Amino acid sequence: MSWNRRLPAIRGKAYFASCSQGPLSQDVMKAIKRYEDSILRWGNPWDEWMEEVYKASDIFADIVGAGRDEVCPHYSASSALISLLSAFKPDKRDKIVTTDLDYPTVGVTLAGMKRMGFDVVTLRSREGCIGLEQYEEAVDERTLMVAVFHVSALNGFRQDIKAISEICRRKGAYLLVDAYQSVGAVPIDVDRMGIDFLVAGTTKFLLGIPGAGFLYARREHAEGLEPTAVSWFSQKDPFLFGREEMDFRDGAKRFEMGTWSVVSMYAAAAGMSIIKSLGVTSIWEKIIRSRDYLRDRLVEEGFELYSPPDQTLGPTISLYVGEKAHRLEAYLKRRRVIASARGPGLRFAHHFFNTRDDCERAVEALSRAVKRLP
């Protein structure tokens, strides 16, 4: 099936930038127009807006295998993470384990947790990977939480979340997963994988726009947590004035804060509906074929992989190009090959619409680029 009509952002392009911004669809454009029409017609249709927000939240829950009461909407993965972490204080368990391959969303937020008295331990990658033995060594009886990525935004390395969760269980630690670089592309089942908390947003493989994120909090944990980063939608009756004591909402919804980016939630529901209708397992099978084909072609042409070559990957392959990364991105963009620079790597993120023709176009453009750029 050709997606050029339904996804106008990919027309005439080899689009490999879903790790940064998923392509705009007609579905999302129509949803944004519905939001605009709701204001023009009604001014402040809160009932309609709330229905759309929670529709998006429910679709996200379905995609990750969560109960709908275990997910709450947010402005971004960052705001979801901040709200969640505000429920914890250092005690006998005062240690949080993370890695140097995690996105700054995690690293910077945890740097703030140090000021609260937490001991944040950062595992150092080895040849672009974090080994399970590193978690075995780092996670102990002081560890409150392991806060890590599913797929690294830097090099595409995909971690064995189930194996990490088993380490956490043995040591009595929570597992928090940043799934922004995998959700919608790689199958996720929070129960089967043993995930306690998960944050993500819809800008990338879920085909939305900035301003929409979600938090998953396992039911058995959520009810016992009292976040301090709260606002009016954290309470059972958001429209109750004069509140002086917190009356938390049930389940994960207690981690909501203030007014959402409503237009982003309209877009989120539309984009995620495409993903849900196709099925993430089917999407992942297509991605693997496209990703591996491009990887093999790039190696044949003599390009150096920044992604670990002998390890599991997510939907993204990264080439090591050093200081040329952003110049190469710009060069390719002028030739309608859309990639994404990150650090010394040039990333090619695959989704269900990518074809072998796209891959060959990328290889040809790259071969020309390295000859012409100093």
Image (tube, grey):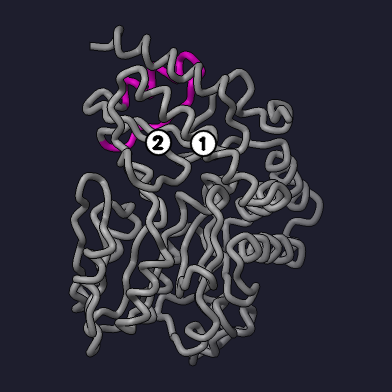
Q: Which residues are magenta?
A: 326-343
Q: Is residue 129 above or below residue 169?
A: above
Q: Is residue 348 above or below residue 370?
A: below
Q: Residue furthest right?
A: 41
Q: Is residue 18 left or right of 5 when viewed as pictured?
A: left
- Split into 4 quadrants, where in the image is the C terminus? top left
Q: Nearer the viewer, residue 366 or 248?
A: 366
Give the crowd class for mark 2: few <14, some 14-19, many >=20 residues within 10 Å. many
Q: Is residue 312 above or below residue 340?
A: below
- Residue type at tag 2: Ile
Residue 155 falls within the magenta-colored stretch: no
Give the crowd class for mark 1: few <14, some 14-19, many >=20 residues within 10 Å. many
Q: Residue 134: x, y in percent?
A: 22, 64
Residue 337 falls within the magenta-colored stretch: yes
Which residue is painted at 34% across and 62% down in the image? 148
Q: Nearer the viewer, residue 211 or 127?
A: 127
Residue 317 shows which numbered tag?
Answer: 2
Which residue is painted at 47% across and 42% down in the image? 315
Among the two numbered marks 2 and 1 on one chain, the one whose residue lies closer to the N terminus = 2
Which residue is painted at 48% across and 21% down in the image? 337
Question: Based on the displayed image, in which of its 4 quarters is residue 96 positioned?
Answer: bottom left
Which residue is painted at 38% across and 44% down in the image? 156
**Which residue is labeled 1 in the image?**
350
- Quick one: SS at disc 2? strand
Q: Is residue 171 left or right of 114 when viewed as pictured?
A: right
Q: Residue 285: x, y in percent?
A: 59, 43
Q: Residue 368: x, y in percent?
A: 37, 9
Work out how far the residue at label 2 is from the one at label 1, CA to CA, in angstroms.
8 Å
- Residue type at tag 1: His
Count of labels in the image: 2
- Quick one: SS at disc 1? loop
